[in-house]
């Protein structure tokens, strides 16, 4: 396996950030174009509440190795899982679902724990194929209150894997410290890291230095067997000649073909 095989895209509908998050440049890059451009073969698809033709996206992803769809709504409505299960019949590279922004400033408490357990069971024992269940968790959401962390463990347990993200680039230096807490919260879960190529939390471009530092540090953890991959965010700015995106491309060209 190559390092590039451990990378995923956090995919969104093309153009969805054209006038948002401090960006005013028009982008046209699709999720599949991003994967082709960066040489990676896995993607999560997150519609961002926009109406999308799921079948068209799934057809475009045909040559990818693994595909996952966002499914936060399943926290309250388990029937929404049936869509991705049905899609997996025709598109066998669909391998997982992901609950984006799971904590949502405490809104996760509105999700019955039994729903998460039932979702995991349905995803793994359905009549099509086993599908993994992932969660997005930000470094700003744990390691602040031991009582909260203890409560939150029960919500982590039903998930196959957790993706650790850092929302604001100013918090990137805290990643090693946060990761030690993250490991304690996820003793029975698979782990991945998210890497923002735009600084959404501070409404401005990410820096080359922060992106390269993260990718180097995440690779160390992958090589150590402590995590299995990195998720790059995201395609709707990747064609705008931004330095952080170029830095990630250069890193992939340097390391992507290395064995792991």
Image (cartoon, rainbow, N blue to C red):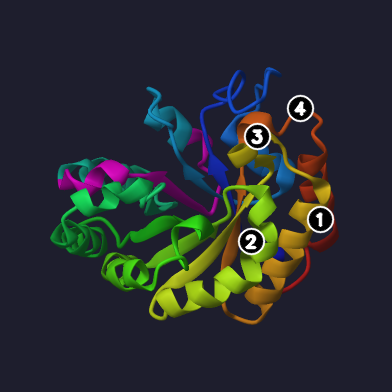
Q: Which mark is residue 240?
A: 4
SS at badge 1: helix
Q: Position of residue 226 (x, y in %)?
A: 57, 78
Residue at left 79%, top 56%?
Answer: 212
Q: CA distance from mark 4 to mark 3?
A: 14 Å
Tag in front: 1 or 3: 1
Residue 219 among magenta residues: no
Residue beneath label 1, please? 251
Q: Position of residue 44 (x, y in %)?
A: 48, 46
Q: Taking 155 as reference, is 168 left or right?
A: right
In this view, the residue in front, 132 or 155, is 155
Can residue 174 be seen here? The reply is: yes
Q: Which range of residues does the magenta coloring cover? A: 59-78
State whether residue 243 is above or below residue 184. Answer: above
Q: Earlier in the sequence, mark 4 or mark 3?
A: 3
Q: CA distance from mark 4 to mark 2?
A: 25 Å
In contact (CB < 8 Å): disc 1 and disc 3:
no
Q: Earlier in the sequence, mark 1 or mark 4?
A: 4
Q: Position of residue 201 (x, y in %)?
A: 59, 41
Give the quarter of the figure containing the N terminus.
Answer: bottom right
Residue beneath label 2, please? 5
Q: Earlier in the sequence, mark 1 or mark 3?
A: 3
Residue at left 66%, top 38%?
Answer: 34
SS at badge 4: loop
């Amino acid at each position: 396996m190559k390092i590039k095989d451990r990378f995923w895209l956090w995919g969104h509908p093309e153009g969805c950030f054209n006038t948002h998050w401090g960006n005013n440049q028009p982008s046209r890059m699709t999720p599949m174009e991003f994967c082709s451009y960066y040489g990676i073969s896995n993607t999560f698809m997150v519609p961002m509440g926009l109406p999308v033709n799921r079948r068209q996206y799934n057809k475009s992803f045909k040559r990818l190795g693994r595909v996952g769809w966002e499914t936060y709504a399943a926290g309250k409505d388990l029937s929404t899982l049936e869509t991705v299960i049905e899609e997996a019949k025709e598109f066998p590279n669909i391998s997982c679902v992901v609950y984006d922004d799971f904590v949502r400033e405490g809104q996760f408490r509105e999700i019955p724990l039994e729903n998460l357990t039932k979702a995991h069971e349905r995803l793994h024992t359905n009549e099509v194929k086993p599908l993994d269940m992932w969660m997005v968790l930000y470094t700003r959401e744990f390691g602040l209150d031991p009582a909260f962390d203890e409560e939150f463990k029960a919500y982590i347990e039903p998930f196959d894997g957790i993706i650790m993200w850092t929302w604001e680039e100013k918090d990137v230096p805290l990643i090693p410290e946060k990761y030690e807490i993250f490991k304690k919260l996820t003793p029975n879960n698979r782990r991945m890291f998210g890497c923002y190529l735009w600084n959404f939390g501070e409404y401005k471009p990410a820096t080359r230095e922060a992106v390269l530092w993260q990718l180097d540090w995440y690779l160390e953890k992958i090589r150590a067997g402590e995590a299995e991959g990195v998720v790059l965010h995201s395609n709707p700015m990747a064609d705008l000649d931004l330095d952080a995106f170029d830095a990630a491309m250069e890193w992939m060209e340097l390391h992507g073909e290395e064995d792991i």
